[in-house]
Image (cartoon, rainbow, N blue to C red):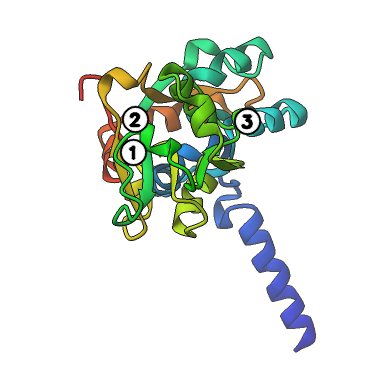
Amino acid sequence: MKKQLVFLLVGLLIFILFGGCTGVRQKTITVFAGAASKPAMDESAQAFEKKTGIKVYCNYGGSGAVLSQMKLSKTGDLYVPGSPDYIPKAERDDIIDTKSVKIIAYLIPVIAVQHGNPKNIQSLSDLAKPGLKIGIGNPDAVCLGLYAVEILDYNHILAEVGKNIVTQAESCEKTATLLSLKSVDAVIGWHVFHNWDPENIDVVYLKPEQLPRIAYIPAAISTFTKDRDSAQKYIDFLLSEQGQEIFQKWGYIATESE
């Protein structure tokens, strides 16, 4: 019985490692992504695997932090930061093929508040009210943090609001979580934060003239990839009708005109 069990386990292990009777291992690719795209990327990765059989592993964090991980480890098939700001940095360090860069979706910076807006925050100037607790992303590693500082500076209220900034989160996801946990009264976030956690997060849109720019999520093939064909197939899937529907489901904007 023991010998039979050992043979059975060894056979099962071989089956798993080498793709069963086919003798072919499952193809895999690794994506280093800013957390601004996490919900949609998770779902699209599952849909892509179901359609193609190619497994997608996603590593999330601040866009700058995951770029540093790629640079140090010299690994990864795709880089998907939360904004275009990190593409020049990735190009400068020869981490991406710039000819492969595609725009996946667009993001709008907003004021994200606790559900019901208990502090009645209606504008950027309200963020300077005494006693408010404001959170932003870490500007040194998180694209959302860069946008927060840029917006406050653009509207000449960085110093006033800066007095109320009590924390700088390590990623977009953790910036949103500050509201979910009621750790702060408001954050400068993305409009999709409401879709991520509608029971705890509402958003207040800024006036168009208060926004120096909107953001978009780019995707680029890494120079470290060992399977460029599969990496390109995943980008093509993200841009396909099915891929775009997944992003739209999570509140992302698909086109610039939209």
Q: Is residue 62 above or below residue 100?
A: below
The residue that mark 1 highlights is 191
- What's the amino acid at mark 2? Ile
The local secondary structure at tag 3 comes to loop
The residue lying toward the viewer, choosing from 56 and 117, is 117
Q: Is residue 57 above or below residue 221?
A: below
Real-space CA distance between mark 2 and mark 3, rounded to the nearest whole angstrom:
19 Å
Residues under numbered marks 2 and 1 in contact, where contact means CB atoms less than 8 Å apart: yes
Q: Earlier in the sequence, mark 2 or mark 3?
A: 2
The residue lying toward the viewer, choosing from 88 and 172, is 172
The residue lying toward the viewer, choosing from 159 and 35, is 159
Real-space CA distance between mark 2 and mark 1, rounded to the nearest whole angstrom:
6 Å
The residue that mark 2 highlights is 108
The residue that mark 3 highlights is 141
- Tag shown at residue 172: none
Q: Quadrant of residue 28?
A: top right
Q: Earlier in the sequence, mark 1 or mark 3?
A: 3
For label 1, count other residues whose C-alpha is less than 10 Å away and answer few (under 14), some (14-19) or many (20+). many
- What's the amino acid at mark 3? Ala
Going by the image, does 158 lie left or right of 72?
A: left
Q: Residue at x 44, y 50 (%)?
A: 185
